[in-house]
Image (cartoon, helix red, strand yellow):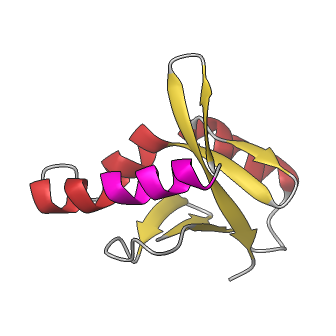
Amino acid sequence: MHLDHSATGGTLADVDNFRELDARIPRSTPPADVQDWLDGLGATRDGEHVWVPVGALSRMGRPSDPKWISQFDKMIAYADGAGWVRTDGDTKLVRAHVVEP
């Protein structure tokens, strides 16, 4: 999955790829625009990673498809086992590597 930043907001691309998760942020994007986008998602940046609310990713995918949700939950469980999931209050966050598209 690829969380793509754009001038109009963001989208979740390649939603059936449960083997990778990254945040594609063009290097030319002004930092304030990136921060606004992250704030809108409830996400935070930590160096070369973005911590994204699991619920936000799920809503951007196929939340009404039980098979998709099952695969998504397995992906998050794998990420949790690898140490790529944390909790902030009541919000579960998953780590996505920042890449330039």
**Position above or below: 77 against 4:** above
* Residue 82 rendering spot, x and y as whole percentages: 61, 56
Asked whether the viewer can see residue 46, the reply is: yes
Between 41 and 74, the residue placed more toward the observer is 74
Q: Which residues are magenta?
A: 73-82
Helix, strand or loop for the magenta stretch, by majority:
helix
Between 74 and 99, the residue placed more toward the observer is 74
- Residue occupying image coordinates x 31% and y 75%: 16
Picture quadrant where residue 100 is located: bottom right
Q: Quadrant of the C terminus?
A: bottom right
Picture quadrant where residue 71 is located: bottom left
Asked whether the viewer can see residue 65, the reply is: no
Q: Is 75 within the magenta? A: yes
Please give the count of numbered marks on the rendered protein.
Answer: 0
- Residue occupying image coordinates x 32% and y 46%: 59
Q: Is 3 within the magenta? A: no
**Position above or below: 47 against 22:** above
* Residue 26 rendering spot, x and y as whole percentages: 75, 74
* Residue 44 rendering spot, x and y as whole percentages: 72, 40
